[in-house]
Amino acid sequence: MFTQTDLYELFRRHLQLCAVHEGERVVVLSQGAERADYADAYLAAARSLGAKTFHMRLPRPLPSSGNWSVGASELAANPAAVEALKNADLLIDCVFLLFSPEQFAIQDSGTRVLTVVEPVELLARQFPTTEHRERVEISAEILAKASVMRITNPHGTDVSYQLGRYPTVTEYGYTDEPGRWDHWPAAFVFTGAADDGVDGRIVLGPGDVLLPQNCYITSPVEYTIEKGFITDIRGGMDADLIRSYMASFDDPRGFGMSHVGWGLDERAHWHGLQQPSFPGGMGMELRSILGNVMFSTGPNNELGGPNDTACHLDIPMRGCSLFLDDEPIVVDGAVVVEDMLPARSRR
Ligand code: FE2
């Protein structure tokens, strides 16, 4: 059980990692009654570090389809609020603005943006470290130089991503650089292929994870991908559920291929979606597992691409091999590049 004092201390350490200092402007954004305790703790923590701070609270969301629709934000109808947020040095986003044009505009103004929406148990368990940042940044350097990513697994996956069109993005759970976004907790790296640059087959096996469904696949699901779009999804009930979910958006762009990369946090576990480990939330632990390979479907506007569909799935997979220009990075679910491994387990 975390008290308000625990939250304050956790968030104060976190703001220090984000290099918050005397005179900075730190704004906390929340919506409705959600995460008011986070907002209070961040305000107190920011003030204790000498920052100027305030809390912007948006009205609670209107009823929706119940789907996880990324990119739609209450800020869209509030240009004055967006202008106020652009004046911040650091925006603590307790709403989840990711994929919204408003977040991109705020970042473009030089404001660093940090998403904090996960349960506090997870924030504490995967508290960011400079070592994880270093490993994520080393991975990003290697990924940014690659032209082709190929992924295979024992279930029959063999898919290629043509890289180089879009930037490489790091997530290590904090941000101290102007205009940079991050999400706490996280430790992974990703990029996206050219819009028509994914071809092949991805076959999910039991234990692979569907997010935002927050569930494990129990039977094989086979995706056929041609020129960057999914043309077929086959399998049993899991495939039916995925197809049904995607169809509910009534948007063919939901079948586009989104970001792809691998996880780098040895503290994150595959059983993290099960009780008693799972504290709720959106599954950031599963995205971060060391040696997972995560592909995603739907939008690529986060990378600067044209696809801004609201239909987005993240799918961390076990036991994959991932090659960059034929060089192995992950083999059978294990990262094989020494510099990407925890210092204590390097040979
Ligand atoms: Fe995603």
Image: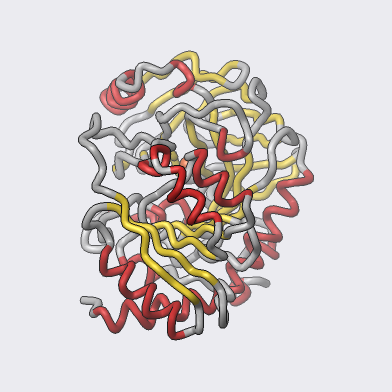
Residue 282 x %, y %: 34, 50
Tell me the residue at 49%/56% (across/down). 85
Left or right, 343 with respect to 34, comes to right
Tell me the residue at 49%/84% (across/down). 49
Residue 121 x %, y %: 31, 69
Residue 143 seen anywhere in this rendered image of the structure = yes
Q: Which sits in the foreground, 34 or 129?
A: 34
In the displayed structure, 118 sits above or below 156; it is below
Residue 47 x %, y %: 43, 81
In the displayed structure, 14 sits above or below 143; it is below
Q: Which sits in the foreground, 137 or 275?
A: 137
Q: Quadrant of residue 234?
A: top left
Tell me the residue at 62%/25% (across/down). 198
In the displayed structure, 253 sits above or below 75; it is above
In this picture the colour scheme is secondary structure
Q: Quadrant of residue 345?
A: bottom right
Q: Which sits in the foreground, 283 or 17?
A: 17
Left or right, 108 with respect to 25, comes to right
Q: Quadrant of residue 340?
A: bottom right
Number of residue marks: 0
Quarter holding the C terminus is bottom right
Quarter holding the N terminus is bottom left
Residue 83 x %, y %: 51, 51
Residue 317 seen anywhere in this rendered image of the structure = no
Tell me the residue at 40%/29% (across/down). 311
In the displayed structure, 149 sits above or below 181; it is above
* Outermost residue toward the front in this view: 80
